[in-house]
Image (cartoon, grey):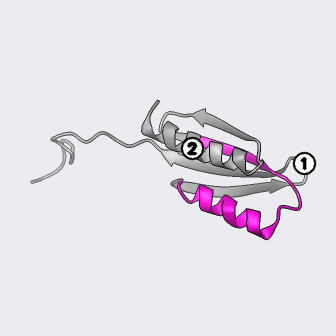
Amino acid sequence: MPASGVTAAAIAARLSALGLPTRVEEHGRHTSVEAEVPDGLSAELWREVLDVVAAADRFGLLATSLNGRTLWAVVRRTVPTTGDVGGPGHQR
């Protein structure tokens, strides 16, 4: 599992421990975590949730009248570095 998957799994585990059902998906350039957020989440629990998703590269909340609220977080995969980091057009 790539490092992004490990970080995403840790985020998902912490959100699950807070009582939020989660899903983790691997993508080409990132790993995503989604969690359903119930109505009536306390301010204290919101602070804990925000502390958890702060470990991600990006996060947000999608709220619709049809699907409720879904918290999402994205952890980017690291790009391996090589000796020619600048690429063929890079002048030295």
Label 2: which residue? Answer: 10
Q: Is residue 43 above or below residue 64?
A: below
Q: Are marks 2 and 1 in contact (CB under 8 Å)?
A: no
Q: Secondary structure at mark 1?
A: loop
The kind of residue on which mark 2 rests is Ala
Say whether residue 8 is left or right of residue 62: left
Residue 44 drawn in magenta: yes
Say whether residue 9 is left or right of residue 42: left
Q: Secondary structure at mark 2?
A: helix
The boundaries of the magenta stretch are 32-55
Q: Position of residue 66 (x, y in %)?
A: 90, 48
Q: Is residue 49 above or below residue 80?
A: below
Q: Residue at x 68, y 59 (%)?
A: 49
Q: Position of residue 69 (x, y in %)?
A: 81, 53
Q: Is residue 70 above or below residue 88?
A: below
The quadrant in which residue 21 appears is: top right
Say whether residue 48 is left or right of residue 1: right
Label 1: which residue? Answer: 66
- In the picture, the disc for residue 81 is none
